[in-house]
Amino acid sequence: MTALSHAITQDSLTSGRLPKFATPVTAVAAAIVGFALAALLAGGNLGAAVLIAYLIFLITMEIAARVIEGARQAADRRARHLIVGAFLLALLPLVSVIWEVVSKGMARFDIDFFTKSMRNVVGEGGGAVHAIYGTLYVTGMATLISVPIGLLTAIYLAEYGVRNRLSKAITFFVDVMTGVPSIVAGLFAYALMGMIVGPGTRSGFSGSIALSVLMIPVVVRASEELLRLVPNELREAAYALGVPKWLTIVKVVLPTAISGLVSGVILAIARVIGETAPLLIAAGFTASLNNNLFANPMMTLPVFVYDSYAHPGTDVQAYWDRAWAGALTLILIVMLLNLIGRLIARRFAPKTR
C-alpha cells in the first residue's frame, strides 16, 4: 500500500500537466468562435468579438486546468491569464493612438513638411519646419533651466536636508507644483515677461519659462527618489577615506544614479513637450520661422497641431493632414529622446564588473 501511494505521488509530479501548445491553440480557437458569435449576435463588432473570445478562452482553460492539473494549478493559470488580459487592455489605447497617428500622418510626412514653413500658405503645401525648430528651442531652453534647479534641489533634499523644516517646506511646495494646471504655468510666464519686458510680450523664452514650471517638480521628485536609492555604504566608504561630502556626491552618488537621473530628465521632457495651453499663451504662434528665442512669437509643434486642426482654412483636409503629420513628428521626437537617454545612461552607468 505504501509503495502504491509512493508511485502515485511520483506520477503526480510528472503527469497532470497541460501541453505547452494548449494555451495558444485554445486562444486561436476562442478567437475564431468569438468572432463568429460576434458576427451573428453583435453585427461583427470588434470589441464584442474580443470580449467574447477572451471569456471563452478563460472558461475553457479553467475547465481544462481543473480537470487535468487540479485546482491549485488552475488558480495559477487563471491569475496569469487575467494579468495578461489586463496588460493587453492597457496596451490597447497606446496601439490605437500609434496606428491612428501613423496611418493619417504619413499623407504629409514628406520633404516639404520638414523644409518649409506656413508663410504665405493658405491651402495645400507648406510644412512645419518653423514649429519643429520652435519645439526644439523652447524645450531645450526649458531643460537647461529645469535640470540644474531640479537636480540641485533633489541633492539638497536627499543629502543635506533630511527631516528639517526647510526640506519639509520644499517637499510640500514641490508637491503643490506637481498639480499646477498647465494653463496656470502659461499665465505665470506671460505675466512675468509682461512685468520684465512689457505687456503683451510673447516669445520662445516665455514659453520655456512656462514649461520649466511644469518640469522642475518632475525632475525633483524623480531625482530625489533615485538619490535615496544609492546605498549608504558607498557614502560611508568615501567618508572613511576622508573624501568631503560634496566630492562624495559628485564622484560617488551622482555617477551611481546617473542612469535613473537621465531617465527622470527624459520623463520630464516628455511630460512637457506636448503641452499646448501654456505655449499658446506664453509663446504665441506664427507662420514664419523664428530663430530668436528672446523676441517675437515662436510656433511649436503642439500649437501647430492644434491650430491646424481647430482652425482649418478653405481646404480643410490639407490642414488636417498637416496636423496629423505634426502629431507623428512629435511622437517620433519623444521616441528619439528616449533612445538618446538610454544610450547616455548605458554609456555613463557605473561598471558592475
Image: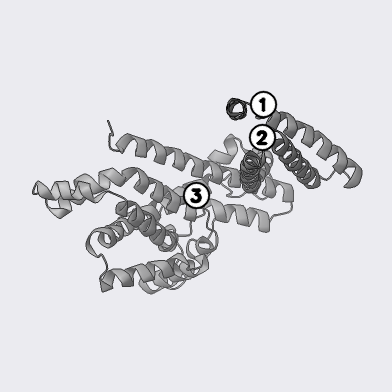
Above or below residue 8? Residue 229 is: below
> In which quadrant will I find the N terminus?
top right
- Mark nearest the camera among 3 and 1 is 1
Q: Nearer the viewer, residue 238 or 254?
A: 238
- The residue pinned by badge 3 equals 289
Q: Residues within 10 Å of mark 3 (few under 14, many from 20)?
A: many
The label number, if any, that marks residue 118 in the structure image:
none
Judge from the rendering whether residue 249 lies leftward or rightward of residue 77; answer left or right.
Answer: left
The residue lying at 86 percent from left, 37 percent from top is: 36
- Mark nearest the camera among 3 and 2 is 2
- The residue pinned by badge 1 equals 19
**Amino acid at pointer 3:** Leu
Judge from the rendering whether residue 351 lies leftward or rightward of residue 68; answer left or right.
Answer: left
x and y percent of residue 325 in the render? 62, 43
- The residue pinned by badge 2 equals 69
Residue 291 in sight = no
- Mark nearest the camera among 2 and 1 is 2
For the residues labelled 3 and 2, the Cα–Cα distance comes to: 67 Å
**Amino acid at pointer 1:** Pro
